[in-house]
Amino acid sequence: MGNQTMQTAEQMLNLLNDLVSIGSISLSEAEIQFPLRVEHHLKQIPYFNENSSLITNHLTTDGRSFLTALYKHDEASKTVVMISHFDVVNVEDYGDLKHLAFQPMELTEALFERSDEFPLDAREDLESKKWLFGRGVMDMKCGLVQHMSLLERAASEQWKMNLLLLTVPDEEVNSVGMREAVPKLLEMAEEHHLNYTLFLNSEPMFALEPQDKNYYFYTGTIGKIMPAALCFGKETHVGEPLSGINAAWMTSMLTNDIEWNEVLCEEVNGQVSPPPTLLWQRDLKKDYTTQIPHRSVSLYNLLLMKRNAADVMTQMKKIAQSSARKMEVFMKDKYDVFQLDSSQLPTIKVLLYEELRAYACEKMGDEYITKLEQSVISQSIGDSREQSIQVVDQLAILSQELGPMIVLFYAPPYYPAVNSSDNRVIRELSEEIIQYSDEQFSYELLPVEYFNGICDLSYAGLQGSLADMQRYDTNLPGGKELYAIPFHEMAKLTAPVINVGPIGRDAHKNTERLYLPFAFEQLPKLLTHLLLAHEKQ
């Protein structure tokens, strides 16, 4: 191995421990510092010591950074982009062991004293002494270690291909890192004459069901979108509830029709997307008063396979219209019970945000509405979801004569689904690694079309038309000023995607853990075989 520092199991474990020790929780100071640590390690590789300009920290608009490191071979244009994220979720769930969450060796040791508090599968894994516990060990710093090791090996052995390591912040929240990296990838391709032929991610394998012991790799990634609804009712005093329409009630009726709704699931080749679920629901009253809530909002988590933003909005409108009719029937029945004149009851309109905005622009002028959106975005405190709610709320108040109404919109983030299963390159590589795993390790590696955790491969290309994606931008309150996805640039990335990573369990839990024998003995060989097979394609 000469002076290589990232090749043996022990070296990789040491590197993993070092990277995990920097607790790069999304939006923390450590997340900002983390890429400098990766750069420090990569500069120990002779190739990068001599070609330090090929390692770059790129600043994001919000002051974080993503890192690229390029190994170039003079005779190659074929380029594999190895994508990882280095942010992790917070560690509150570790309780009194929080101080050890980023010290995997010490944490794993400390857990032995309280293993009886764990579910059986975690206890068995702990007692086997083959698993390493800690925040980020499997999601996804082990994947980053693999990519760093591959980069070192390619440079040392002068593989006849180019390898571009890309590691980004913010995957766990809004993917600022990956969204801003996409245009940079196009720039780098031009500058260095790179032809991107494969996007490789190494997020960990996830169990498809409890106690699942299978080995998987993924030829795509599931998508995620956040359809949202602002219900605008009619204000009244709580002493006269029948004179108004309670928006919080409207929202609960709508949520009842969306929660776990199988119509919003998809099935592709036997794999079914999980049903939608409510993520956030509240009324928009600022203080306690005896006025009923007449504006209320809800955000829903929806996972995608083939569908895109335009498809989902069509489905949501249909469900909301059906919900509105149920609300009207309910109100009419209650008016009859209380012997009131139900002929005076209004119909409940269902509008898309783009329709509400067009109406507000016609009423107040384009310039007024644009300035209003900008001022809300610059003044409102909170995250981008909160800001999108504030924008739609302001426009609904300006257009309240349209009420009662349900306004459908999108809140960030949006991860489009990607699937490369039918790609020739991926079909051949899949056969290669399945056969290799069988011959070398005697286990069956199973292909899954969609990685069932969310991941940054969503932005490594565009499956769907730009016109359909436009529907996302036009129904996002605040638009690109608030949250921009580089759809046009993504459309120029045409290489297929694959995800081959370590075996891990319990991502985002205090029992997050990594299976060491596979991570540092077998996975490096598997990934090396994958890349060398791709070089020959």
Image (spheres, rainbow, N blue to C red):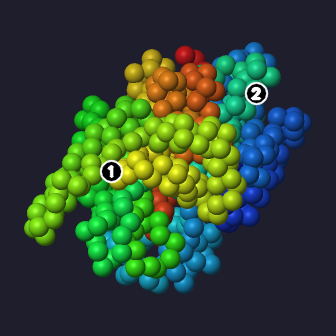
| x and y, in percent, of residue 188 in the image | 76, 27
Does 201 sit left or right of 220 as displayed?
A: right
Q: Residue at x 23, y 55 (%)?
A: 344
- Regarding residue 286, the answer to whether it shows in the image is yes
Q: Is mark 1 on a helix, strand or loop?
A: loop
Does 419 sit left or right of 358 as displayed?
A: left
From the image, which quarter does the C terminus lie in?
Answer: top right
Give the Cα separation between the discs numbered 1 and 2.
38 Å
Observer-side mark, 1 or 2, equals 1
Q: Residue furthest right?
A: 50
| Label 2 Cα crowd, 10 Å radius (few <14 / some 14-19 / many 20+) | some
Residue corresponding to mark 2: 188
Image vertical order of residue 271 relative to residue 374, above or below: above
Image vertical order of residue 489 relative to residue 506, above or below: above
In this view of the protein, which residue sits in the foreground, 248 or 302? 248
In this view of the protein, which residue sits in the foreground, 520 or 421? 421
Q: Residue at x 34, y 35 (%)?
A: 314
Image vertical order of residue 279 relative to residue 364, above or below: below
